[in-house]
Image (tube, rainbow, N blue to C red):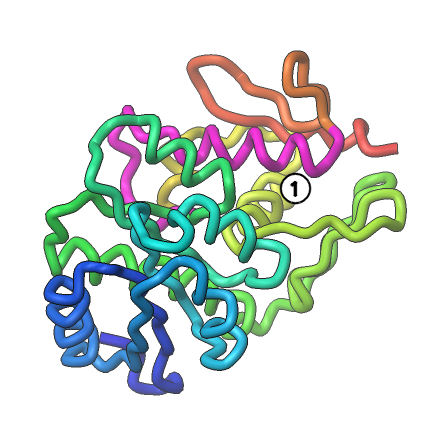
Amino acid sequence: MPDSNSSVKKILLVEDDRQLSDLVTDFLTSEGFHVKQEFRGDTVAKRVKLFSPDLIILDVMLPGKDGFGVCRDLRPEFNGPVLMLTAKSTDFDQVLGLEIGADDYVIKPVEPRVLLARVNALLRRGDLPNQSEEKGEITCGGLYINKASRKVTLQNENVDLTSQEFDLLWLLAGKAGEVQNRDYIYKAVIGREYDGLDRSVDVRISRLRKKLHDSTDTPFRIKTIWGQGYLFVPDAWS
């Protein structure tokens, strides 16, 4: 259930199976959320502008435009969390969704309590900067990160990050020069335990490297420390 001290969170549910959509809507509404339904991929952008959701639940298979295309097109304008629904348990759908900007995924058939846990975890991560009294800044050479505004610039150029990409960068940069293991990163950024198989953090690291002009083959700014985790290199940002 949403925090009683916060305003009601708005969720846009994009699912063409109307029976499933109604069931999920009824469940989330009973948990205190304000839910709007959309049934086509090619009408999502308009609904997002009108509704301004805090979170989007997005099915992969949609008429008009599939969920991957919707997510890819939304990302330049929508920085809130996107939770994808996929009927496949294969890595392909999951990794592809994360690569184009989704924050998490749930495999169908949807288990209501699992969905609720993922929704709450994503919304908690989005709320943290506003709830915190800390309004920090980090500067490393040409990299500037502002926690309050969630603004990132590199060599004075804006860097557009999703909510979880920002959280991941803030975590790593805040502990520059220290290896952060996957268990800690998953708990802090994703909001759940690392199961040893989930690749969502690896995908986000890859996206961060691309956006921050780090090498994907031999990264020097955010390094992979094999068997341990990731290292933000403080003197690699000039």
Question: How many labels were placed on the picture?
Answer: 1
- Residue 151 on the magenta span: no
Question: From the viewer's perspective, is residue 214 above or below residue 102?
Answer: above
Whether 114 is drawn above or below 226: the answer is below
Name the element at disc 1. helix
- Residue at 42% in and 49% down: 103
Q: Does the magenta-highlighted stretch encompass residue 197?
A: yes
Residue 46 position, x and y percent, is 51, 72
- In the displayed structure image, the side of residue 174 where residue 11 appears, left or right: left
Residue 188 seen in this snapshot: no
Is 189 positioned to the left or the right of 78 in the image? left
Q: Is residue 122 above or below residue 9?
A: above
Sort mark 1 into few (<14), some (14-19) or many (20+) by Cα contacts within 10 Å: many
The quadrant in which residue 122 appears is bottom left
Q: Nearer the viewer, residue 178 or 37?
A: 37
Provide the residue span drawn in magenta: 189-213
**Is any part of residue 91 visible from this angle?**
yes
Q: Residue 179 or 46: which is nearer the viewer?
A: 46
The type of residue carrying mark 1 is: Ala
Percent across and percent down for residue 22 are: 15, 71
The single residue placed furthest to the front in the displayed view is 64
Q: Residue at x 88, y 43 (%)?
A: 155
For the C terminus, the image quarter is top right
